[in-house]
Image (cartoon, grey):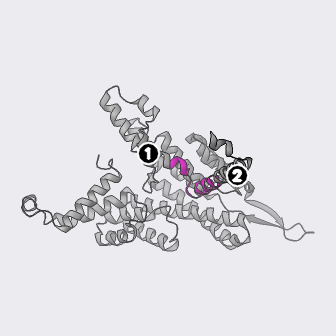
Amino acid sequence: SMFLNTLTPKFYVALTGTSSLISGLILIFEWWYFRKYGTSFIEQVSVSHLRPLLGGVDNNSSNNSNSSNGDSDSNRQSVSECKVWRNPLNLFRGAEYNRYTWVTGREPLTYYDMNLSAQDHQTFFTCDSDHLRPADAIMQKAWRERNPQARISAAHEALEINEIRSRVEVPLIASSTIWEIKLLPKCATAYILLAEEEATTIAEAEKLFKQALKAGDGCYRRSQQLQHHGSQYEAQHRRDTNVLVYIKRRLAMCARRLGRTREAVKMMRDLMKEFPLLSMFNIHENLLEALLELQAYADVQAVLAKYDDISLPKSATICYTAALLKARAVSDKFSPEAASRRGLSTAEMNAVEAIHRAVEFNPHVPK
C-alpha cells in the first residue's frame, strides 16, 4: 500500500500510454499477418501451442463422439494435437470430394476445413479494388458464401455479367456513327470456382481451368504493366499473380490425375522457375508427389535437399518423403538379425530418426 501511495498521476498516464501503444502494435501485426497468411496469428498460436498445454477440448467433438470412454479419449487427444496447415495436395471438391460423398453418404470436409479454405480464397483471389468491377465484386461475396450451390450460382452470374458488359460501344470519332466493339477480360476466378466445385470429372475441371488460364493470363499481363502506378494497381497485380499461379498449379495436378505425369512435372518445374518467390502455394510438394509416382528418386532427393531445411516450416509431405528415401536407401541390405548383433549403422539410425520425426509431426498419416 505504501508503494501505491507514492505513485504519481504521471505514472498512470505513462502506463496507459504504454499499454495502448503495445495494443496498437499487436493489432497492426495481427492485421498484417492475416493479410499475408489468411489466418489469425493469435488464433493459430492458441490452437497449435497453448491449447494442448491447457488440455483444451473442442465441445463439438466431445458432444458428437461415441458413448464409450475410449472413443472420447481418442477424440480429445486428436483435437488437442490438431495442427493448422495449408494442404497443397487437396482434392477437387466437385470431381473428388463429392464423389466420396456420393459413394459413402458422408461429408469428407468439416466446417473447420471449409473455413480455412474460405480464408485462403479470400486472401489469394480478392483485393481492395474488387468493387470497381461488378464481376469481381460478385466473386468477392461468392468466396465468403458457405452454401455450395450459392457459390456456383454466383460464379455463373459473374460470367454472365462479364459477358453482357464485354461488348462496350466506343465511338471512334465523336461526331460519327462508327462504333468499335471492345472486349473486356473474362472473370478468371469464376472459372476457378466452377472448376473446383461444379465440374464432376477431372477432364471437365481441366477444361474450365484452361479457360481460367486464358482469362487470368490476360489480367496478369495488364496489371504487370500498371503495378508501379500506385498501391491499388500493386494490389491488383499481386492478386492476379496469385490467381495465375493457382490456375497453373491446378492444371498440372489435373494432368497428373489424367495420367500425364511427366507433363505435370514439367509444368510444375516451369512454374517454380517463373515464380520462385511464391512459396505459400508449396508447389514443391505437388512436384514431390509426381516425382515419387515416376519413381524418380534422384530428382526427389534433389528437391528435398532444397526444401528439407531445419529453418523452413515442415510439412507431412516433406517429413514422410525424407523418411521414405532414407529407409529405401538401407532397406535392401537391412537384416533384423544382423542389426541385433552389430547394432544399427549410421544410415539406419538416420532412417529411424527420420521416421520418428515424420510420425511426431503428423501421427495420423500411418493410420
- Helix, strand, or loop for circle 2? helix
Q: How far is the residue under mark 1 from the one under mark 2?
A: 56 Å
The residue at 19%/68% (across/down) is 346
Q: Residue 140 in the image: x percent, y percent?
A: 65, 50
Does the magenta portion include 40? yes
Q: Magenta residues, as a range? A: 25-44
Nearer to us of marks 1 and 2 is 2
Does the magenta portion include 32? yes
Residue closest to the eye, 262 or 343:
343
The residue at 88%/71% (across/down) is 173
Secondary structure character of the magenta stretch overall: helix
Any part of residue 267 in sight: yes
Q: Residue 357 in the image: x percent, y percent?
A: 31, 57
Question: Disc 1 marks which residue?
Answer: 97
Any part of residue 200 in sight: no
Type of amino acid at the residue the image marks with label 1: Tyr
Classify residue 297 by image quadrant.
Answer: bottom left
Q: Residue 123 in the image: x percent, y percent?
A: 59, 55
Which label number is shown at residue 14?
2
Which of the two discs, 1 and 2, labels the residue nearer the N terminus?
2
- Helix, strand, or loop for circle 1? helix
**Image quadrant where one finds the N terminus:** top right
The residue at 51%/58% (across/down) is 207
